[in-house]
Amino acid sequence: MKRIVAAILAILIFIVLALAFVKIPFGNINLSDYHYYNPITDKQTSDSVPQHYLVDGKKDTGSTNIVTAVVVDYRGFDTLGEVTVLFLAATGVGSIMYIFEKEKRRKVRRANAVVETASQLLFGFIVLFGAYIFVHGHLTPGGGFPGGAVIASAFLLLYLAYPRFHAEHKTLNVAESLAGLTFVIAGLLGLLISGSFLYNFLPFGVPTYLFSAGIIPVIYVAVGVKVGSELTGIVDAMMGVRE
Amino acid sequence: MDLFTLVSLILIIAMLIAAVVAAELKDLLSAAVALGVVSLIVSILFYILQAPDVAITEASIGAGLSMAVLIFAIKHTERWEK
């Protein structure tokens, strides 16, 4: 009986989702064909917010990756909130795991030689790839959040291969605090210079170059370091064995 | 039927099978691995739907870190479902 109810519920949810997805125009659409109601001028207009982002995004922010332009520049304040939520989640995990600290098993088994050697070889490359993702966030797909997650998964590999390995808590805390401070200071400098929080005050440079797009790469490197150290802290709280 | 639709269909069917296996298995550790397979196939689907940034995030968070959380929970409770 329970299984039948669960199956019916799942099918109902699927139908509702499918009906919602039918309306979304995926793929190549001509945005100027769509008309939106502008409440200020009380007219139908073809100049919509998504069209503005796609057409003028590169000019406004200097970033060739429009997703990054939206996440860090147009909606930068939301990203600050998102980073704060992740910080609170990491703090919560740390404080809950602190209770279990004493009960952690002392006896640990070594991983086999293949895992140990492979993780030694791969660790540097995975960290390098994560750093590449967040340093090039304004040029290629990716950014601070995926880059930080990739770096944390590299540390997870080390925790799995070497059960006695643990990252220094102080180093993680310092990296995380400095990254958070960089984000807020970049925002406050924008407030000082032009009167709006997170204003892109640095010169844009030439799009498609590494040093371009003003403060976007600075903020994304900070976000990458912050997310990486937070997720590594969570992995450490769960996997690490204290002597 | 073109190649894109064929590959997508195969991936979606494999994903559904992995999801049902994850729900039905009594061995929770194997169920967690099946869940990781679901995440991996979802990330490949994101990639062929031209969202590589979402694919990277899904692969590292879904197939990597959340698996670690699940395995940690199984290690501290019980492996077999009653």
Image (cartoon, rainbow, N blue to C red):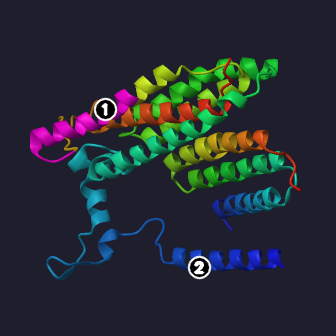
What span is colored magenta in the figure?
A177-197
> What residue appears at the point 58 percent right and 28 percent down from the top-left corner?
A126
For the residue marked with disc 1, what is the amino acid?
Answer: Leu
Number of numbered labels in the structure image:
2
**Residue A160 location, x and y as percent?**
71, 27
| Quarter of the figure with the N terminus of chain A | bottom right
Q: Report the magenta stretch's main SS.
A: helix
Q: What chain letter is assigned to the residue under label 1?
A: A
Q: Distance between the residues labelled 2 and 1?
A: 43 Å
Q: Do labels 2 and 1 share a chain?
A: yes
> Is B15 placed above or below A84 here?
below
Check the picture and name the quadrant holding the C terminus of chain A: top right
Task: Report the chain holding disc 2.
Answer: A
**Residue B69 image offset from top left, x and y in percent:** 67, 42
For mark 2, give the secondary structure: helix
Q: Residue at x 28, y 30 (%)?
A: A211
Q: Which of A109 and A118 is in front in this view?
A: A109
Residue at 66% across / 21% down in the picture?
A242
Give the residue at mark 1: A181
The secondary element bearing badge 1 is classed as helix
Residue A16, numbered label: 2
Q: Quadrant of residue A153?
A: top right
Q: From the top left corner, tell me how far across and down residue A81 is, in percent.
A: 36, 49
Of the pair A195 and A220, the residue shown nearer to us:
A195
- A189 is within the stretch colored magenta: yes
Residue lying at 47% horizontally and 20% vertically, measured from the top left: A171
Instruction: Using the image as rendered, state which of residue A190 and residue A212 is in the foreground.
Output: A190
Q: How crowded is mark 1: few (under 14 residues within 10 Å), some or many (20 or more)?
A: few
